[in-house]
Amino acid sequence: MAERQELEIPGVGHPQPFPHGVKVGNVIFTSGVDPIDPATGKAGETIKRQAQLVFQHLQTLLKAGGATFANVGQVTVYMQDPGQRGALNTEWVKAFPEGMVRPARKTIKFDFGTSGILIQLQVIAVV
């Protein structure tokens, strides 16, 4: 059986019975990463801030598993309003700059209810 390692985002708890991510062998799978600001414990105020937070959290998880954004093969994006992709794309090109083989991506419209969350990302990376 492949070695398994749970990956967590320091300072960002979640009341779920599963980790923020898991590394199985040389593959990292993240749960849906929320845009929670560790300083406040709440979602960022704007879609731009939420996108920044999600990419910061993903970078933390990837690093904990021995990876970087260059190792990401697929990203699933959940958005309250896919019409706000511009804010996501601003952060996307920082994480996945031109010249890098960028990961596959799909975007799903998702109703986060009254949580204040506007965006959530889930990735698969190979180390």
Image (cartoon, rainbow, N blue to C red):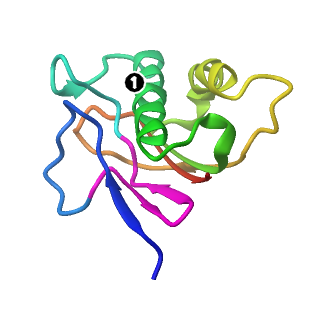
Residue 112: % across, % down: 33, 45
Examine the image and state in which quarter residue 96 appears: top right
Name the side, left or right, on which 44 lies relative to 11: right
Q: Is residue 23 magenta?
A: yes
Magenta span: 19-33
In the displayed image of the protein, which residue is found farthest to the right?
A: 99
Q: Residue at x 61, y 52 (%)?
A: 127
Specify the quadrant that holds the N terminus: bottom left
In the displayed image of the protein, which residue is found farthest to the bottom?
A: 1
Name the side, left or right, on which 27 lies relative to 23: right
Q: Residue at x 65, y 25 (%)?
A: 89
Examine the image and state in which quarter residue 5 appears: bottom left
Q: Is residue 48 magenta?
A: no
Q: Amino acid at mark 1?
A: Leu
Front residue of 49/114: it is: 49
Q: Residue at x 27, y 31 (%)?
A: 116
Residue 11: % across, % down: 19, 30
Residue 3: % across, % down: 42, 70
Q: Which residue is mark 1?
A: 53
